[in-house]
Image (cartoon, helix red, strand yellow):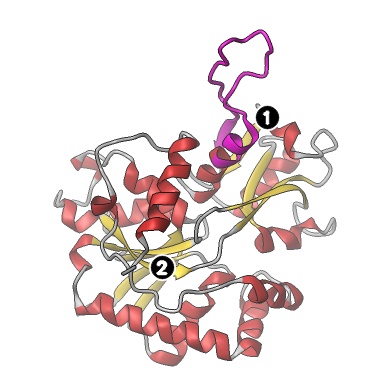
């Protein structure tokens, strides 16, 4: 039996996954997706990966959207082979998204300066894309700012520029091809140093109102022993992460793009799941409600049964 192909974002959150492979013989091929959850959605639907560990909002937005036509699916057109569902909870704590622009951008000093500007995202449908609309909803950017507009008109809050990678996003806000972007705070923080490549500055932040990372699997894996074994090994990796903080800091600071101080600060606030198997109904419902309010997803006919493969009890 071929090892599972697991897509993940090569950031600090992947440390327990690394430990599961290193210390507990997780039988899997770990495939990094630096451009994030949106790219993993494409790869799941094309049959290139079996499992994805990514952002809650990215998975829900993809699952709540209309399915791609059969020609866009895996070669045999079998939707069971190319579609996926949420099967697990990886991180229980919310994610802090830093809102950043170029370090020398004197025209942008606060979130209010961003309305109607160009938002850089990794991909359409990614977490960096979805959270832009959640921010727009929080700030009231969907409504006309003109006092003469009665009733208020729906407005386009910003232009969207897909730029693939974190480095490209930093470049874009420095050369004015984008005005701002949103990325996880600690990943962004290192580049607030003016001497860093393509330096940026923070103008705001927004937290997800839901737990931040979920596990998805192709439909054909749900109920299979391979998936249950993955849950067991991830639980062991998370337990090892909790008990071996020094090794975790060493891995994050030597193999990933973070300093030791930032790694320690992040570890104090992050909360991984006690048991990764399954997802709570309330978490998905809250995410759906927020994304509908922000205009990211519509009402649609698909519901929780279509999106969630393993529900947590209680």
Question: At 31% across and 57% down in the image, what residue appears?
Answer: 44
184 with respect to 259 (left or right): left
Q: Are marks 1 and 2 in contact (CB under 8 Å)?
A: no
Mark 1: few/some/many CA within 10 Å (<14, 14-19, 20+): some
Q: Nearer the viewer, residue 233 or 305?
A: 305
- The numbered dot on residue 176 is none
Q: Give the left or right position of residue 155, taking residue 217 as reference.
A: right
**Could you say whether the residue bearing mark 1 is in a helix, strand or loop?**
loop
The residue that label 1 is drawn on is 115
- Who comes first in sequence, dot 1 or dot 2? 2
Q: Nearer the viewer, residue 69 or 158?
A: 158
Q: Is residue 162 visible?
A: no
Residue numbers of the magenta segment: 134-161
Q: Quadrant of the N terminus?
A: bottom left
- Residue drawn at x 48%, y 82% is 238
Q: Indicate whether 91 appears above or below 122.
A: below
Could you classify mark 2 by the number of other residues whose Cα lies within 10 Å: few (under 14), some (14-19), or many (20 or more)? many
Q: Which residue is mark 2?
A: 89
Q: Is residue 32 above or below residue 156?
A: below
Q: In the picture, residue 89 is in which quadrant?
A: bottom left
Q: Which quadrant of the structure image shows residue 218? A: bottom left
Q: Position of residue 18 (x, y in %)?
A: 48, 80
Residue drawn at (55%, 41%) of the image = 134
Residue 32 vs residue 65, the one in the foreground: 65
Apparent side of residue 60 relative to residue 145 in the rendered image (left or right)? left
Q: Position of residue 253 (x, y in %)?
A: 68, 78
Q: CA distance from mark 1 to mark 2?
A: 34 Å
Q: How far across and down, in percent of the image, does residue 314 sit? A: 34, 68
Q: Is residue 146 magenta?
A: yes
Q: Nearer the viewer, mark 1 or mark 2?
A: 2
């Amino acid at each position: 039996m071929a090892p599972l192909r697991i897509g993940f974002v090569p950031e600090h959150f992947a440390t327990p996954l690394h430990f599961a492979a290193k210390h507990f013989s997780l039988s899997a091929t770990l495939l990094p997706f630096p451009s994030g959850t949106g790219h993993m959605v494409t790869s799941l639907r094309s049959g290139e990966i079996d499992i994805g560990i990514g952002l809650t909002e990215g998975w829900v937005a993809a699952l709540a959207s209309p399915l791609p036509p059969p020609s866009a699916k895996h070669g045999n057109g079998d939707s069971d082979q190319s579609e996926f569902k949420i099967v697990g909870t990886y991180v229980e704590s919310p994610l802090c998204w830093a809102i950043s622009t170029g370090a020398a951008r004197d025209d942008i000093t606060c979130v209010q300066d961003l309305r109607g500007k160009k938002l850089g995202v990794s991909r359409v449908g990614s977490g960096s894309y979805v959270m832009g609309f959640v921010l727009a909803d929080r700030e009231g950017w969907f409504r006309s700012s003109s006092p003469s507009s009665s009733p208020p008109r729906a407005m386009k809050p910003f232009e969207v520029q897909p730029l693939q990678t974190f480095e490209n996003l930093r470049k874009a806000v420095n050369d004015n091809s984008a005005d701002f972007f949103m990325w996880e705070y600690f990943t962004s923080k290192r580049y607030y140093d003016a001497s860093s490549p393509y330096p940026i500055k923070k103008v705001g932040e927004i937290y997800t109102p839901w737990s931040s990372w979920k596990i998805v699997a192709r439909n054909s894996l749900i109920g299979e022993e391979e998936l249950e074994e993955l849950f067991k090994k991830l639980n062991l990796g998370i337990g090892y992460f909790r008990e071996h903080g020094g090794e975790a800091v060493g891995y994050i600071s030597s193999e990933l793009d973070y300093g030791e101080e930032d790694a320690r600060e992040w570890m104090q606030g992050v909360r991984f799941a006690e048991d990764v198997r399954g997802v709570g109904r309330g978490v998905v419902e809250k995410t759906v409600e927020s994304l509908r309010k922000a205009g990211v997803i519509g009402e649609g006919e698909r519901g929780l049964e279509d999106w969630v493969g393993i529900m947590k009890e209680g």
